[in-house]
Amino acid sequence: MRESRVIWGHQLILGLVIALAVAGAAAAQDASASRAVNSGVLPAENVSAANASASSIGTKTDYVIGPGDTLSINVWNEPEVTGKVPVRPDGMISVPLIGEVQASGQTPAKLQGIITSKLTEYVRQPSVTVVVEEMNSRQFNVLGQVQHPGSFVLNRPTRVLDALAQAGGFSVFAKTNKIYVLRRDSSGDTTKLLFNYKRVSSGQDDQANIELQAGDTVIVP
């Protein structure tokens, strides 16, 4: 009888230890998730939704590379050819073994094919990946009566209000009801798009808060 009570006691203790371990692991997981949300690493939504929405710049295969961009070139099992390279003002990049390559005007997929073709003379069946790490060639300008006029990198969706915020807001003499965006199309023609800050900020003319394109210039008179 005493032996049965001892065995039962050991089982009870073991059960409590397992329960505490499970609870501790769950609490640690919750705390980790909470820290991720609070630090901005993850949104308040679930992790799978965040992973689905996250995308690398390099996955945008229709992106056209330009001067000032930074590329990451990876050649499997060939570390001497692997690394980050800047696109020079002349649009060229320097790649070990194959030398100068025209990168500007190419998509990552097309440039990947060019490098692969050239490397076949030196590497057997090269496996090449090209990723755009920094899209510095895509820029917009904010000029006129703002705190910090200049050029800004267009590396994420940016609307006129976002651009004005990046430029530090208005100066004292800004005519906020006469702002406009200058946009040049492929034929070289320039379009003037009006933007009334007071109306947009009050929700009356939201369609004027357009998403900027590379080369757009926001003018604040």
Image: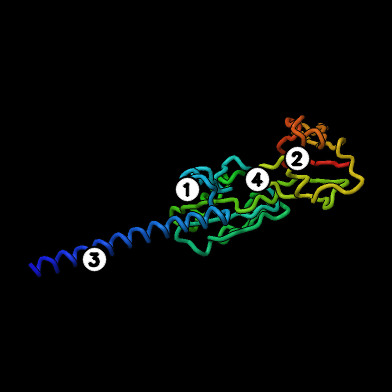
Of label 4 and label 3, which has the lower sequence position? Answer: 3
**Distance from the alpha carbon under mark 2 to that under mark 1:** 31 Å
Residue located at (33% from left, 58% from top):
22
Residue located at (53% from left, 43% from top):
53
Q: Is residue 140 left or right of residue 115?
A: right
What residue would you read off at disc 4?
A: 156
| Element at label 3 | helix
Q: Pick the residue in front: 135 or 16.
A: 16
Q: Residue furthest left?
A: 1
As shown in the figure, which amino acid type bears the numbered disc 4?
Arg
As shown in the figure, which amino acid type bears the numbered disc 1?
Val
Of label 1 and label 3, which has the lower sequence position? Answer: 3
Of label 4 and label 1, which has the lower sequence position? Answer: 1
What residue would you read off at disc 3?
A: 13
**Distance from the alpha carbon under mark 2 to that under mark 4:** 13 Å
Q: Pick the residue in front: 195 or 19.
A: 19
Of label 2 and label 1, which has the lower sequence position? Answer: 1
The 10 Å Cα crowd at callout 2, few under 14, some 14 to 19, many 20 or more, is many
Which mark's residue is nearer the viewer, 4 or 1?
A: 1
Q: Is residue 150 left or right of residue 159?
A: right
Q: Is residue 31 left or right of residue 204?
A: left
Cβ atoms under marks 4 and 1 closer than 8 Å = no
Q: Position of residue 192 (x, y in %)?
A: 83, 32
| Element at label 4 | loop
Q: Which mark is residue 47?
A: 1
